[in-house]
Image (cartoon, rainbow, N blue to C red):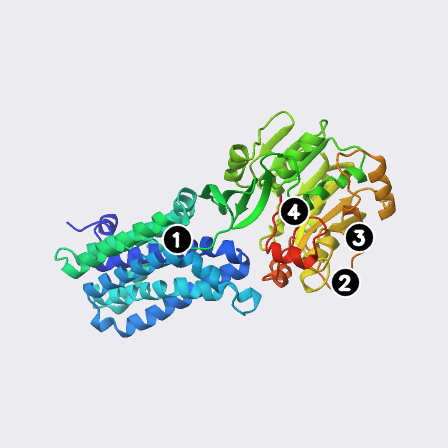
């Protein structure tokens, strides 16, 4: 009786198994590469473009050389490819972080900064996996070259699909980067043994057991790298990013993709650890009626926590995309939902589109230096925020950019975009120079211009729980925007606007750092958080 198509898939030949697993492994490693390099190089379009390009180039080269050597293909050759792949994965797990950090300082253009690390870490194993398909086609026993090639591509593509979905929806949400590497390494070892059966030679057995032991050891050690973030309290991979909570010098910090995003003084949770978060109170000088606040972006809930403490009449809603971030904020940063604090786990734009609530203040705190959700930068989005604000409502955006120079393009484009919707837009650079920093941009629906002098006068008259006299000295209200685009849903080249910032220091001061020179601040902290 002839076998059905489904039963033939379940009874794979050894070449088919090799192609299937190579598809799973190559696609899984490609997604894993993004997670490994993001803490150092970010996850911009340039990083992902480099990853995709390197993997395609390595596979193509492997296909080419494998095809040239296909006449010498054997099951033993397939075994050696998988053993070699597993050995290289062990090296990536053990030394990957150290290698990535070491290559970060290479003198290459900023948009290509991740390319050397990606090429040397993931190019070789992907190249050797490329040998599998032409070898398998040769070993398939089919006389029809077209049929053999088509079958190989089909099996390999099915493997790639499974690898993509399994890594994205199961492995990354469940395991650490090192353990995901362990999974793919052990899969390669087991495949090598399956291909060598039934007569597994001594060399294959010794190499397989030895490499499996190295893989387990590498995953247990967590890899070798330079880490000055303090004592890790919690670490996981979420569906969106790497997340780590670390304690150092009495401060608890939330790191997302290796960058600090929130900090809390363990002895005084409502103290502003980073100086720029003090600017969150500026809207209370522009409006005398702020009772309901929306934060788009939660992180460690620095802003919401301080608002609830300082302003008893304020109710805060927080929209955070990553549910794991919300769980960590509750577990490690003392956040508790209450009648005054409501947390919504969803996309910020989706929430604004679906809610029928209006707010006195909307705080946009979902931007990063290297990764900005373009859908929350456009004119259409700004109009949506205006629609959800009361008549005297205020929009506050925590941007990361430079106030002038080439690295200011994103800031000035966003300023221009907000100005197209709101009659008055003010900005407050937080580091007082042209370096990349947090720039707080405040837009109002009130057409009356509030001068710097009037803001200072209001700061003296009003009791808003904090003195902003020093912060208000950076007041700006008229930015040159002729050379930057108006961001729209149809055209928002955010990655291009962010590109001049790649590789530049991101400067921020802590609130206990007073009279610190700009040079000292830059040397003290190479990356800065968002709240």
N-terminal of the pair, mark 4 or mark 3, is: 3
- Of mark 3 and mark 1, the one earlier in the sequence is 1
Q: Quadrant of the C terminus?
A: top right
Do the residues bearing badges 1 and 4 touch, measured as CB atoms within 8 Å? no
- SS label for mark 4: loop
Element on which disc 2 rests: loop
> Picture coordinates of residue 486 (x, y %)?
71, 57
Spot occupied by residue 321 in the image (x, y as percentages of width and height): 55, 41
**Looking at this view, is 122 or 353 the one in front?**
122
Depth check, mark 4 against mark 2: the one in front is: 4
Image mark for residue 530: none
Q: Which residue is mark 1?
A: 223
Q: Which residue is mark 2?
A: 482
Query: In front of the other: label 2 or label 3?
Result: 3
Q: Dot 4 corresponds to which residue? A: 510
Residue 421 location, x and y as percent? 76, 48
Horizontally, is 151 left or right of 397 in the view?
Answer: left
Instruction: Name the quadrant containing residue 448.
Output: top right
User: Reading the chain from its start, which is encountered first: label 4 or label 2?
Assistant: 2
User: Label 4: few (<14), some or many (≥20) within 10 Å?
Assistant: some
Q: Earlier in the sequence, mark 2 or mark 3?
A: 3
């Amino acid at each position: 009786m002839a076998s059905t198509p489904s039963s033939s898939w379940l009874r794979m030949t050894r070449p088919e198994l090799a192609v299937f697993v190579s598809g799973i492994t190559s696609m899984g490693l490609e997604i894993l590469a993004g997670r490994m390099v993001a803490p150092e190089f970010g996850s911009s379009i340039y990083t992902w473009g480099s990853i995709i390009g390197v993997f395609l180039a390595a596979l193509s080269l492997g296909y080419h050389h494998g095809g040239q050597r296909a006449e010498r293909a054997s099951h033993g050759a397939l075994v050696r490819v998988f053993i070699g792949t597993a050995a290289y994965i062990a090296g990536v797990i053990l030394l990957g972080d150290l290698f990535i950090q070491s290559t970060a300082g290479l003198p290459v253009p900023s948009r290509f900064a991740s390319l050397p690390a990606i090429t040397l870490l993931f190019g070789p194993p992907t190249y050797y996996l490329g040998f599998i398909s032409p070898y398998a086609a040769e070993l398939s026993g089919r006389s029809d070259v077209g049929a053999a090639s088509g079958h190989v591509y089909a099996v390999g593509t099915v493997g790639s699909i499974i690898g993509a979905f399994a890594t994205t929806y199961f492995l990354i949400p469940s395991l650490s980067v090192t353990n995901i590497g362990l999974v793919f390494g052990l899969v390669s070892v087991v495949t090598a043994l399956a291909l060598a059966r039934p007569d597994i030679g001594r060399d294959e057995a010794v190499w397989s057991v030895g490499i499996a032991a190295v893989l387990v050891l590498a995953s247990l050690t967590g890899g070798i790298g330079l880490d000055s973030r303090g004592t890790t309290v919690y670490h996981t991979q979420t569906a969106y990013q790497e997340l780590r909570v670390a304690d150092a010098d009495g401060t608890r910090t939330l790191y997302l993709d290796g960058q600090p995003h929130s900090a809390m003084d363990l002895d005084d949770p409502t103290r502003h650890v980073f100086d720029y978060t003090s600017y969150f109170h500026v809207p209370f000088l522009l409006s005398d009626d702020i009772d309901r606040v929306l934060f788009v972006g939660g992180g460690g809930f620095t802003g919401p926590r301080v608002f609830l403490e300082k302003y008893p009449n304020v109710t805060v809603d927080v929209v955070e995309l990553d549910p794991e971030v919300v769980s960590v904020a509750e577990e490690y940063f003392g956040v508790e939902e209450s009648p005054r604090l409501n947390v919504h786990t969803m996309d910020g734009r989706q929430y604004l589109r679906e809610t029928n609530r209006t707010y006195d203040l909307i705080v946009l705190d979902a931007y990063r230096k290297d990764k900005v959700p373009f859908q929350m930068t456009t004119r259409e989005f700004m109009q949506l925020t205006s629609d959800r604000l009361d008549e005297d409502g205020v929009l506050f955006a925590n941007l990361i950019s430079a106030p002038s120079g080439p690295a200011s393009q994103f800031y000035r484009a966003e300023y221009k975009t907000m100005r197209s919707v709101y009659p008055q837009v003010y900005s407050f650079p937080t580091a007082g120079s042209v370096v990349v920093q947090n720039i707080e941009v405040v837009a109002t629906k009130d057409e009356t211009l509030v001068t710097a002098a009037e803001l200072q006068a209001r700061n003296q008259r009003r009791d808003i729980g904090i003195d902003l006299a020093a912060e208000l000295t950076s007041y700006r209200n008229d930015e040159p925007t002729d050379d930057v685009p108006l961001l729209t849903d149809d055209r928002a080249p955010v990655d291009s606007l962010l590109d001049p910032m790649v590789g530049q220091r991101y400067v921020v001061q802590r609130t206990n750092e007073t009279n610190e020179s700009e040079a000292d601040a830059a040397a003290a902290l190479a990356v800065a958080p968002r709240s």
